[in-house]
Image: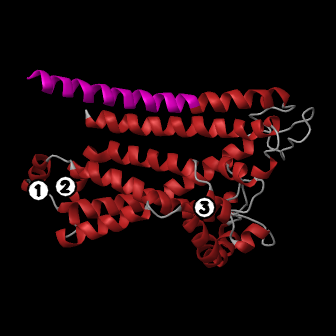
Amino acid sequence: MSKGTQKQDNFFAGAMKGAGIFIVVVIASIGIFLLWNAIPALQHDTVNFFTYDGPWSTDDPDAMEFGISNLFWTTIVVSLVALILALPISLGISLFLSMYCPQKLKAPLVYTVDLLAAVPSIVYGIWGAGVLGPFLGPVFKWISRTLGSVIPFLYSEPTDPPLGTARTVFTGAVVLAIMILPIITSTAREVFNQTPKGQIEAALGLGATRWEMIKLAVLPFGRSGLISGAMLGLGRALGETMALFMVIAGGTFGGSLFDSGTTFATLIAQSAAEFKDPLSTGAYIAAGLVLFVLTFIVNSIARGVLARKGK
């Protein structure tokens, strides 16, 4: 290798290492900023930050009351329901695109699915509030009336405003499911496409049908890719703001999917007008810190699973 080539190689290796260090520094800086600004507010909190589920009061520095219990469960429920709705659909789409789709249709369909990820979240929010909500409203009322007595988390009082307007946690979960669908589909599709041809041909050579080949060769090989895609989609759902802000009526989540609710992100968005001084702002920054840690953990697990599969 010539000296010029060696210098170029060293330069690009150093540049890539520097880029990696820069990303770590940025993430660490965000975490330190959130923690630094949250600590003063947490010191003035007169209730337990992790278990308090009542209304927030941050105006009086000597009587601050704020906690994340209800926010945490609302965020987790709406994100998990979205994942449950999106996962089987994403699996079906990714298998179709990988194993069944004609070549002429494959590229346009892949592009269409990927395009869903580029739609701004506020557009999903407008569509969810203006189209999906009114459509699902009568369906939710029928489900609540028919199954609510058997399945408690599907019951809501007929006169409750969220059920009447369909601005419920379930509606938010449906919108989120559509938003995370391309993430899960793309990740799973890429891993399914990497299934060794030898395994596919061996299964077909032994007389397996296309579906049996998928069960014996493709799904076992691509399981980790599907899991990592699901985790990435979950991380995306946990931090969604505008779509849920427009679709779900703000309020306290009572345990039913047809209730209103407030997630970490929507609370911060709807309370931006209260960011008057560092102390009251720090209360919301503390909630943001919890969301930051939660999404960081979920995405790290997803990346770890995907990296382990790559090895």
Q: Are marks 3 and 2 in contact (CB under 8 Å)?
A: no
Crowdedness of circle 2 by 10 Å Cα count: few (<14), some, many (20+)?
many
Quarter of image, res 40: top right
Q: Is residue 126 left or right of residue 298?
A: right
Query: Which dot marks residue 243?
Result: 3
State the CA–CA distance, disc 3 to disc 2. 40 Å
Label 3 vs label 1, nearer the camera: 3
Image point (75%, 58%), residue name: 250
Residue labelled with disc 1: 204
SS at badge 3: helix
Instruction: Identify the image's colour scheme: rainbow, by chain, secondary structure or one colour.
Output: secondary structure
State the CA–CA distance, disc 3 to disc 1. 45 Å
Instruction: Report the amino acid beneath label 2.
Output: Met
Image point (43%, 56%), residue name: 87
Residue 171 picture location, percent across and down? 62, 65
Crowdedness of circle 1 by 10 Å Cα count: few (<14), some, many (20+)?
some
SS at badge 2: helix
Compared with residue 23, is residue 128 higher up or lower down, i.e. above or below?
A: below
Residue 54 picture location, percent across and down? 83, 45
Regarding residue 17, the answer to whether it shows in the image is yes
Instruction: Report the amino acid beneath label 1.
Output: Leu
Magenta stretch: includes residue 6: yes
Residue 36 picture location, percent across and down? 69, 27
Residue labelled with disc 2: 213
Quarter of image, res 130: bottom right
Magenta residues (range): 1-29
Residue 274 picture location, percent across and down? 81, 48
Instruction: Report the amino acid beneath label 3.
Output: Ala
Crowdedness of circle 3 by 10 Å Cα count: few (<14), some, many (20+)?
many
Q: Are marks 1 and 2 in contact (CB under 8 Å)?
A: yes
